[in-house]
Amino acid sequence: MNCENKLKGKAKGQMSFTLKPFTMLMIIIMLIFLYVYLNSNEVKKEEAKKDLEIRSASTDILLLLANSEDCLAYQLPSGVSAYANIIDVNKLEEFSEVYNGIEPSCARNYDFGFRVEVVEIVMTSMGPREAKKWSFGVQNFSREYHNNLVSYWMPVALKYSEKEVGIGKIRLTIFDGDLQKVAGFLDRSCTMGRAGLINQTSQAFQISYPISYEGGQLCIGMKNKACRKTLCDINMENITAKGNYRLEVSFERPNRLILVT
């Protein structure tokens, strides 16, 4: 009997010794799974937050462009009020020239870049077709360097004169990325410097691609670069490697920013 009990105890000990590593392995696997699951949820939450931000920004920009008197909205000569969603074609012509390559200040969002296209729709015997087109905002944006991109449109009226009104649509393409964030920071600093509100400021960035200033434009990438205009001239050393940076800028009148990293 004692011998039998000893054998049973030995067998239990062997089983316990065998099960301990297995149990530890299962615990480790479960912890890894839990970490991945929680991290995945956080990533999804962050993506949903960014998606909501860009959609909200696009709505605000479209409404400002079409309804603000500082943007494209048509206003009665008496100055009483602006019509809703009626675009002044004279303003549209001006925006196409002045804001070729940069967003208009009246609807600027410093976190995102955008491009706007307005198309006139005319009726023909073959049905509706596109006629005149106007565009302004960022011209060159590469899918390689932006994180999110969405496009929205809404119908508008095109006011040529008191007697001549056309119909059309305004389309907004909005996007974000390293280039847009850095350019937004620089343009905000430029605007505030011109207004005499600040002379120096700084902001932290996580940058994934080289950023340089060349030919009067801020560019991202090495070979297939995407470039855009900035409000101020920039004096800077090129950012040649990805990493975390704190960009410090000082404003020099009349129109220059000195940037150091």
Image (cartoon, rainbow, N blue to C red):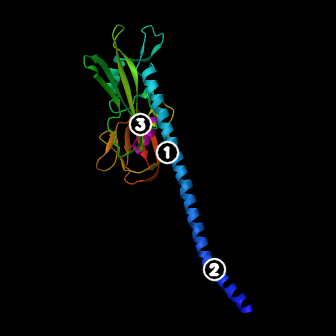
Residue at horizontal 55 percent and vertical 62 percent from the top: 32
Query: Label 3 neighbourhood size at 10 Å, few (<14), some (14-19), many (20+)?
Result: some
In this picture, is 21 found above or below 158?
Answer: below
- What's the residue at 54%, 54% (across, down)? 39
Between 40 and 160, the residue placed more toward the observer is: 40
Q: Residues within 10 Å of mark 1 (few under 14, many from 20)?
A: few
User: Disc number at residue 100?
Assistant: none
Q: In 3D space, how far apart are the residues under numbered discs 2 and 1 (Cα atoms)?
A: 47 Å
Residue corresponding to mark 1: 47
Q: Main secondary structure of the magenta part?
A: helix
- Name the outermost residue toward the left: 125
Q: Nearer the viewer, mark 2 or mark 1?
A: 2
Which numbered marker is on residue 150? Answer: 3
Vertical order, 61 against 237 (above or below):
above
Please state the horizontal and vertical placement of residue 138, each as a whole percent of the image.
35, 34
Residue type of the residue flagged with mark 2: Met
Which of the 4 quarters of the picture holds residue 118? top left
Kindly identify the amino acid type of the residue bearing the numbered disc 1: Glu
Magenta residues (range): 178-188
Task: Judge whether residue 70 can be spotted in this image.
Answer: no
- Image quadrant in which you'd find residue 191: top left
